[in-house]
Amino acid sequence: MELDLPGGTEAGVPDMSEVSWAGIVAPAHTPDEIVNKLEREIVRIVRMPDIQEKLRLEELDPVGSTSAEFASTIAKDWITWSAVAKEAHISLEQ
């Protein structure tokens, strides 16, 4: 299903960043050795030229970041979008 939604500029918010991302997470308390192995394998696979090509054909920008980098992305986005929601009087559920 494709949605035809206006972008930030079209909606009257010219400075809005329109970036989305997807990632893979493990359950809380997963042992470090399992997280590290998953991270290594996922990064290795995402960085394969044929995988990169297939993802780009789907208009995706494959990154293959570390767990720490991904956690930082999530934390920054949480701060940003929490502030937007607060200003718009939208309550967040955790």
Image (tube, rainbow, N blue to C red):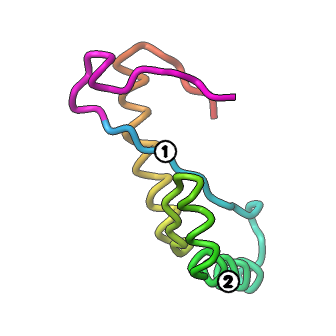
Gap in angstroms between the C-alphas marked 1 and 2: 25 Å
- Looking at the rendered image, the quarter that the C terminus falls into is top right
Q: For the residue marked with disc 2, what is the amino acid?
A: Asn
What x and y, as percent, mark residue 75? 46, 52
Instruction: For label 2, count other residues whose C-alpha is less than 10 Å away and answer few (under 14), some (14-19) or many (20+).
Output: few
Q: Residue 19 vs residue 65: left or right?
A: left
Name the residue beneath numbered marker 2: 36
Quarter where residue 57 is shown: bottom right
Compared to residue 20, the image places residue 50 above or below, namely: below
Name the residue beneath numbered marker 1: 20
* Residue at the image point whose x is 48% and y is 21% from the top: 5
Compared to residue 51, the image places residue 76 above or below, namely: above
Secondary structure beneath label 2: helix
Q: Residue 40 vs residue 33: left or right?
A: left
Secondary structure beneath label 1: loop
* Residue at the image point whose x is 70% and y is 83% from the top: 41
Residues drawn in magenta: 1-16
Out of 33 and 50, give the one closest to the viewer: 50
What x and y, as percent, mark residue 82? 43, 32
Out of 89 and 10, give the one closest to the viewer: 10
Whether 14 is among the magenta residues is yes
- Looking at the rendered image, the quarter that the N terminus falls into is top right
Compared to residue 83, the image places residue 76 above or below, namely: below
Out of 7 and 91, give the one closest to the viewer: 7
Q: Residue 44 vs residue 28: left or right?
A: left
Q: Residue furthest top?
A: 89
Q: For the residue marked with disc 1, what is the amino acid?
A: Ser
